[in-house]
Amino acid sequence: MSVQGQRGRKVARNSRRPLTTFYLIIGGVLILVLGFAGVFALRGKPSESAATPVTAAIGRTADGHYYKGNPKASIKVTEYGDFQCPSCAFYEKSLAPIIDRDYVNTGKVQFIYHEMPLTMHRNSQVSAEASRCAGDQDQAKYWQMHEMLFLNQDQWAEISSPATIFSSYAGQLGLSRSTFDNCLSSGANRQVIGESAQTAEAAGISATPTFDVNGQQVDASQLASTIDAALRATGK
């Protein structure tokens, strides 16, 4: 789990900061691994070959965030995520296919992604803009770029300028690379991403990934059980 240093859980500003941040990241991933082990035991691990295809509705909410799943579903799940967050990538590779399979594609959940780029990650802002630039051409491509960024996080996370790599992803997804490149270089989505981060922080979100299930904030290891409890509460 990646933690925003400015809110509550500060990282010490001294020579130990890189090591402290490393331990926070490793600890967060370890918690997710242990939590996911229980989920896999109950539900079965998803296929290693590919993520579960999203067959449900795709669109944008009234406040401009991308969603997948039935917009009329009684269960609303919002993920607050950072594309450079290692724990977010682990969730995307491990648990997200189960959530899509069991809840999104079945119409039980509307799943909303709320970008929250953390300042501790050098390419989190531009990667969030890249996903939006893909969605500007085709809303379905937002989710395909979303997946591409997380699955290939190691390729771009620490390089000084990832725009060329992101452009290659756009080409692989069948997008117009020139349109994508112009969008990314112009910062067309910079403001909306900044506003997304501000509203996340105003909601008290300090770490990624954090999930809101009908108003209840949980981490990834609690997500499936919290959705199940919410469904039971609605009689489903």
Image: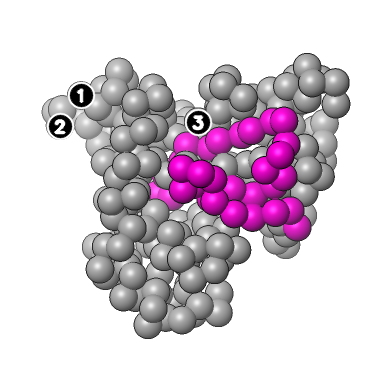
How many C-alpha atoms fall within 10 Å of the one at disc 2: few (<14), some, or many (≥20)?
few
For mark 1, what is the residue? 12
Q: Position of residue 46 (x, y in %)?
A: 76, 49
Q: Is residue 87 above or below residue 48?
A: above
The image's colouring method is one colour
Query: What is the number of callouts on the image?
Result: 3
Q: Which numbered tag is attached to residue 210?
A: 3
Which label sits in the foreground, 3 or 2?
3
Q: What's the CA distance linking mark 2 and mark 1?
A: 9 Å
Kind of residue sitting beneath label 2: Ser
Q: What's the CA distance linking mark 3 and mark 1?
A: 23 Å
Q: Are marks 3 and 1 in contact (CB under 8 Å)?
A: no
For mark 2, what is the residue? 15
Label located before the other in sequence (3 or 1): 1
Kind of residue sitting beneath label 3: Thr
Which label sits in the foreground, 2 or 1?
1
Q: Nearer the viewer, residue 186 or 208?
A: 186
How many C-alpha atoms fall within 10 Å of the one at disc 3: few (<14), some, or many (≥20)?
many
Label located before the other in sequence (3 or 2): 2
Q: Based on the displayed image, in which of its 4 quarters is residue 6 positioned?
A: top left
